[in-house]
Image (spheres, grey):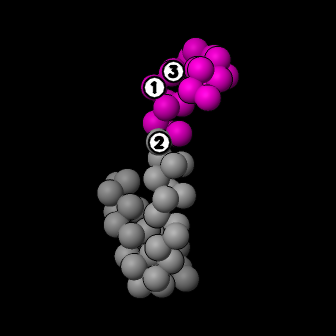
Amino acid sequence: MGKTRFKSNKDLLMLLFVLIKNNKKWFLLPILFVLAVLSLFVNLTGNQSVLPAIYALF
């Protein structure tokens, strides 16, 4: 597999979806969804401490 440059995040997401679809690895979708939600949560908290916010969720 050669080096691939992505022009945007949309290209990367489309490639991941095509890879999952072609290889029938549907169990990866929930894992990617949870990672996306957690990364969004961490990004939204900004410079604040993340641990108290995560602790409040659970």
- Residue, x 47% and y 47% (percent of image)? 36
The three-letter code of the residue at mark 2 reads Val
- Residue, x 65% and y 23% (percent of image)? 55
Q: First in sequence: mark 2 or mark 1?
A: 2
The three-letter code of the residue at mark 1 reads Leu
Left or right, residue 49 beside residue 29: right
Q: Which residues are magenta?
A: 38-58
The answer to which of 48 and 2 lies nearer the viewer is 48
Q: Farthest front residue?
A: 58
In the figure, residue 20 lies in which quadrant? Answer: bottom left
Can residue 10 be seen here? The reply is: yes
The three-letter code of the residue at mark 3 reads Gly
| Magenta stretch: includes residue 46 | yes
The residue tagged 2 is: 37
| Magenta stretch: includes residue 39 | yes
SS at badge 3 = loop
Query: Mark 3 to mark 2: distance in Å?
Result: 15 Å
Is there CB contact under 8 Å for labels 2 and 1? no
Query: Mark 3 to mark 1: distance in Å?
Result: 5 Å
Location of residue 47 with respect to 13 vertically, above or below: above
Label of residue 46 in the image:
3
Q: Position of residue 31 (x, y in %)?
A: 54, 58
Left or right, residue 7 beside residue 26: left
Is there CB contact under 8 Å for labels 3 and 1? yes
Q: Position of residue 28 (x, y in %)?
A: 52, 67
Location of residue 39 with respect to 51 vertically, above or below: below
Q: First in sequence: mark 3 or mark 2?
A: 2
Location of residue 42 with respect to 25 vertically, above or below: above
The answer to which of 16 and 32 lies nearer the viewer is 32
Quadrant where the C terminus is found in the figure: top right
